[in-house]
Image: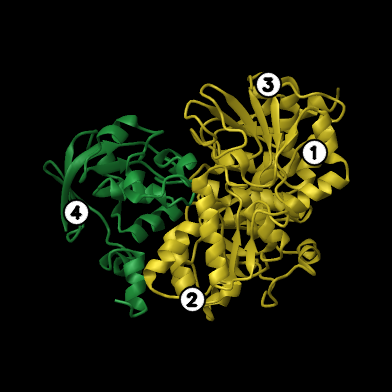
């Protein structure tokens, strides 16, 4: 799989409260509706104008804080193609994979791109292409790859239980 | 080579010895969820399994918006209620005087037991490490899958050892200590790790204090946080335990750690976390005089009886200068504080007492903030917009510091309030 998209660039320790505010966690139930509030308290510009296929590039510890899954769902529903960060907070890391939202750990891209740049990600080759630079990223652990191949946790569980 | 707590607990659950970085699949002893049980049950239904794997292992405690502040919240509660009824799952804590904040209630009811594996669809599930439990937060979809399969995967975490010696000086608390640790370790300093608190400084702490420490494990990125279970834990769980299949487990003295730190509690002084991150540590004395509009005492971090006693000790015979919201962490705490006169002392001082639940901690209701307002809170998160408007400000502190600050309407040092 290959994607190409425009970069939204953020710093370190972006928490799940600013990705999807706590006040909405029990009032917004529709997945598509969640997408409208993505990153509202961090970057109103993203909330207004992020497009399907866009790529988030962030610093360390993306998604720290609450276990709220809407922080992954709102980005998935917004059509975000991938999140590339130096590191991810662990619950959010699992939530993204469970949702089938591709996440990539890389510490090289941050210094090479600015907001609005176009980058390409080739998941099969494990490569991020920025202009004439190619950055390699490591494959998922075997167990996680199985989850990703099945399209997220629920399809993975259904398959394991023989329900598909 | 010795084993860490996480290696022992996950090894016990896996049925064979395990080491850090191995991936294991284990059966959880208990699964905790709260108001998000509604959405979890919808996802569960999509899987296509009719019954949860073991109904007696599902624990549901409504707390995030109780009583329901909106019909949307009420729908979640209704779904949770119907799901637990249909599954004939016995451990349901509804909006009633048997309830409270999920993490407090879970422990009071004897679900947090040494050596067991608990998963919760809430990040502060790590609180149960105060009882020697391996407890960690997960997302909603993952909980739905665990209900269906009775299985969850973990990478066995590397461990982070924090040695703690000595005793607190007067008017310094476990919250001041853990905020200092947060300032040192930072919000990703324990990412994916199991944080172990060791030493006589921990064995000298009450269960409530240990819960405060473990509660903030997630704020440094940890998978779980844990204190060595001792006689205090055994005394607490006696007569409450909801399972017999538990075992005292602790790290070997020659276990291998990815990171180590040590602290002497006598060197800790009152501290705060400034807006908008939990690791933005500062001494109370350097923040003294910062104007506040609201004070909040409660939550799974600091809403226990001894926290209310600490606040009442400062507020007794005085009047608060700003609106001060007190929320006991459970109805067991509420009832005890009612009986021993603590609530009356707080009401006399001008505080309002709300029913047990998460309250304004996550900005749902009962004390949300207006633009430009500042709250000093005993909770565990001060992220931007957490308690309401994104242009509001949250300082985190101990119940003593929050109470002292409420009296003056500005951040104040509890050591001075108690002198006066």
| Structural crowding at the residue carrying mark 4, measured as other residues with C-alpha within 10 Å and reported as few (<14), some (14–19) or many (≥20) | some
For chain B, give the colour: yellow
Q: CA distance from mark 2 to mark 4?
A: 43 Å
Query: Which chain hosts label 3?
Result: B
**Mark earlier in primary sequence (3, 1):** 1
Can residue B377 be seen from the camera position used here? yes
Above-or-below relation of B128 to B399: below
Q: CA distance from mark 4 to mark 1?
A: 56 Å
Determine the secondary structure under disc 3: loop
Rendered green, the chain in question is A
Can residue B160 be seen from the camera position used here? no
Residue denoted by label 4: A127
Query: Which chain hosts label 1?
Result: B
Query: Which chain hosts label 2?
Result: B
Residue B95, x across and y down, in percent: 65, 53
Residue denoted by label 2: B51
* Foreground disc of the pair 1, 2: 2
Q: Nearer the viewer, residue B114 or A21?
A: A21
| Structural crowding at the residue carrying mark 2, measured as other residues with C-alpha within 10 Å and reported as few (<14), some (14–19) or many (≥20) | some
Whether label 2 touches label 4, CB < 8 Å: no
Above-or-below relation of B117 to A46: below
Determine the secondary structure under disc 4: strand
């Amino acid at each position: 799989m290959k994607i190409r998209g425009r970069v939204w660039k953020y710093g370190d320790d972006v928490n799940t409260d600013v990705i999807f505010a706590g006040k909405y966690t029990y009032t917004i139930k529709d997945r598509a509706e969640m997408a409208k509030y993505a990153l509202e308290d961090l970057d109103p510009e993203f909330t207004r104008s992020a497009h399907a296929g866009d790529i988030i590039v962030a610093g360390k510890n993306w998604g720290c804080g609450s276990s709220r899954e809407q922080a992954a769902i709102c980005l998935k529903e917004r059509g975000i193609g991938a999140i590339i960060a130096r590191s991810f907070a662990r619950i959010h890391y699992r939530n993204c994979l469970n949702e089938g939202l591709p996440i990539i750990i890389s510490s090289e891209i941050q210094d090479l791109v600015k907001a609005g740049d176009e980058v390409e990600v080739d998941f099969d080759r494990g490569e991020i292409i920025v202009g004439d630079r190619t950055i390699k990223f490591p494959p998922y652990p075997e167990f996680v790859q199985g989850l990703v191949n099945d399209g997220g946790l629920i399809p993975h569980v259904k398959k394991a239980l023989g329900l598909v | 080579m010795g084993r860490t707590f996480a290696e022992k607990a996950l090894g016990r659950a896996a049925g064979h010895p395990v080491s850090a970085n191995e991936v294991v699949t284990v059966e959880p002893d208990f699964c905790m969820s709260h108001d998000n049980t509604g959405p979890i049950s919808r996802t569960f239904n999509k899987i296509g399994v009719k019954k949860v794997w073991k109904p007696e292992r599902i624990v549901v405690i409504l707390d995030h918006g109780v009583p329901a502040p909106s019909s949307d919240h009420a729908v979640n509660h209704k779904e949770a209620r119907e799901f637990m009824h249909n599954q004939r799952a016995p451990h349901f804590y509804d909006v009633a005087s048997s309830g409270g904040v999920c993490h407090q209630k879970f422990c009071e009811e004897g679900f947090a037991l040494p050596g067991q594996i608990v998963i919760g669809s809430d990040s502060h599930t790590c609180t149960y490490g105060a009882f020697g439990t391996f407890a960690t937060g997960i997302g909603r979809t993952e909980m739905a899958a665990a209900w269906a399969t009775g299985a969850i995967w973990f990478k066995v975490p590397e461990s982070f050892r924090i040695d703690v010696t000595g005793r607190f000086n007067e008017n310094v608390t476990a919250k001041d200590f853990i905020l200092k640790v947060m300032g040192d370790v930072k919000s990703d300093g324990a990412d994916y790790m199991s944080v172990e608190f060791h030493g006589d400084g921990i064995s000298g702490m009450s269960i409530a204090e240990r819960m405060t420490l473990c509660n903030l494990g997630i704020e440094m990125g940890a998978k779980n946080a844990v204190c060595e279970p001792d006689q205090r834990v055994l005394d607490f769980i006696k007569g409450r335990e909801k399972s017999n299949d538990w075992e005292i487990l602790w790290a070997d003295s020659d276990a291998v750690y990815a990171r180590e730190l040590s602290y002497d509690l006598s060197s800790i002084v009152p501290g705060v976390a400034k807006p908008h991150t939990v690791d933005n540590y500062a001494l109370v004395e350097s923040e003294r005089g910062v104007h506040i509009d609201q004070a909040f005492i409660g939550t799974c971090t600091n809403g226990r009886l001894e926290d209310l006693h600490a606040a009442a000790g400062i507020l007794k015979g005085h009047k608060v200068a700003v609106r001060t919201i007190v929320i006991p962490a459970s109805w067991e705490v509420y009832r005890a504080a009612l009986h021993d006169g603590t609530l009356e002392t707080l009401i006399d001082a001008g505080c309002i007492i709300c029913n047990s639940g998460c309250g304004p901690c996550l900005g749902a209701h009962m004390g949300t903030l207006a633009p430009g307002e500042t709250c000093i809170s005993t909770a565990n998160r001060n992220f931007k917009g957490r308690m309401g408007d994104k242009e509001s400000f949250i300082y985190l502190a101990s119940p003593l510091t929050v109470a002292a600050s409420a009296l003056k309407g500005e951040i104040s040092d509890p050591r001075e309030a108690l002198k006066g």
